[in-house]
Image: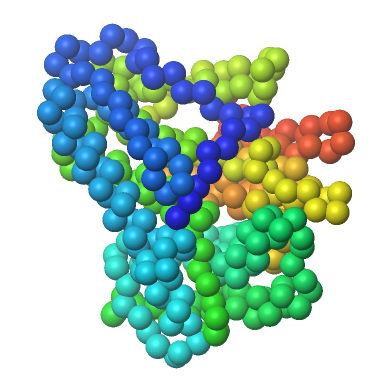
Amino acid sequence: MRFHQLFFVIHFLVNLSPLIAHSQSLKKFEFSTFKMGTTFRLVFYAKDSSQANLVAKKAFRRIDDLNEKLSDYHNESELNKLSQSSGTNTFVPVSDDLWKVIIVSLEASKKSKGAFDITAGRYVKLWRRAKRKNELPSAKELEDAKKAVGYDKIVLDQKSQSVKLIASKMKLDLGGIAKGYTLDEILKVLRGEGINSALIDGGGDILLGDAPPEANGWKINIAKDSSSTLNKTLVLSNISIASSGDLYNFVEINDVRYSHIVNPKTGLGLTNQITSTIIAKDGISADYLASTLCILGIKDGLKLANKHDFPAIIQVKQGNNTIICQSKRFKKLIN
C-alpha cells in the first residue's frame, strides 16, 4: 500500500507545543518511519524512553501487519487474495481488520451514492499506467473495467465474516480509506500501553488523541495560503484531520490536467482542480470523506458535509480564480 504526502493551499500546520507547560511526570517523545509509501510520525507523552521505544515499536509493527492485509501492491496480501476470488461464487473468510474496513467502505459508498467505491481497483490500475505512459486508457479498456466496478457487487455474510465478489476480475483498492484506519489502529496500540496524549501524522493526515498533559488540546493552525487573512488556531483533541486533492499529484495528457483521484463513475482522474480538508471523529472517516468530497465537487460535497454535520473546506481553482467554500460546522469552528 502506498500513500503520498500532499500539501494543499488549504492546509493544517501542527504546533506540537502544548498550551501550558506539561507536567514533569511525563515527557514528550517523537518517532517516525517510512511505511506504506509515506511517513508516519508519532508524537506522544510517556513516563520514560524505555516505555516510549517499546510503544513505538509495537505501533510500527501494527502498520506492517495492516499493510500485509490491506495493500493492493503486495500480490500475497489478504486484500489481493480476496480480489482473486472474484467471480468464483465463493464466500471468503476475512480478518477482523479487512472486515471492518469493507463494512465502513460500503457505508461510505451508500452515503456518497457511489462517489466512494473500493471496487474501482481496475480503474485505478488503468490510471496508474496512464500516468506512467502519459496516455489515456482506451474506451475498450474502460468499458471492460466497468464490468468489475460497483459496490453492489460485494456481498457479505456476517455470520461467517466472509465476503463474496460476484463479478469476475474485480480488484479492490483501499487507498482512500486504509490509511485512516491505520491511524486509528496506531492510536489503539498507544492507548493499550497507557499512552493517551498523542498525535499521529500519516503523510499529512492527522489523528489526535487526548490533549498534552495540563493542556486543553493540540494547537492546530489553519491558513488558506501564505498571505491569507484566514489564520485561525484551533485547540483540538480526540479528532482527525485529513486532506485530499491534486495540487502536486497530477498528470497532463493532451493538454488536460488529470488528478490522481479516480472518479469511480468514469474511470478517469478528476479534471477539476479541487482540494478538500475534513475534520472527523476518527481517522477512517476523515480519510474517505476527504477524497469523496473532491469527487462530489463543491455543491454535492458541501451538501454531504452539511447533511452529516462535519467540518469541511472545499476549494476549486477556476482559471485565475479560486472558489473556497466551508461547511456550516466548519464556519462555527473558526468564528
Q: Is residue 135 above or below residue 334?
A: below
Answer yes or no: is residue 319 visible.
Answer: yes
Residue 86: percent from the left, percent from the top?
48, 82
Front one among 134 and 213: 134
Residue located 65% across and 61% down the image: 129
Give residue 267's position: percent from left, percent from top. Answer: 69, 65
> Residue 323 location in percent, x, y?
78, 34
Give whichever of 97, 169 is nearer the camera: 169
Q: Residue at x 61, y 74 (%)?
A: 149
Outermost residue to the top:
21
Classify 280 as above or below 8. below
Determine the residue located farthest toward the bottom in the rendered image: 89
At x 79% / y 74%, what residue is drawn?
A: 139
Q: How many marks?
A: 0
Across and down, in percent, residue 200 comes to 37, 35
- Tell me the colour scheme of the image: rainbow
- 77 relative to 231, above or below: below
Query: Does 277 sit left or right of 283 as displayed?
Result: right
- Which quarter of the image is occupied by the N terminus? bottom left
Query: As drawn, is 52 to the left or to the right of 230?
Result: left
Q: Which residue, as the protein is rendered here, is positioned at the far front? A: 133
Q: Is residue 301 visible?
A: no
Q: Is residue 262 left or right of residue 50?
A: right
Where the C terminus falls, by quadrant? top right
**Residue lying at 65% horizontally and 43% vertically, measured from the top left:** 249
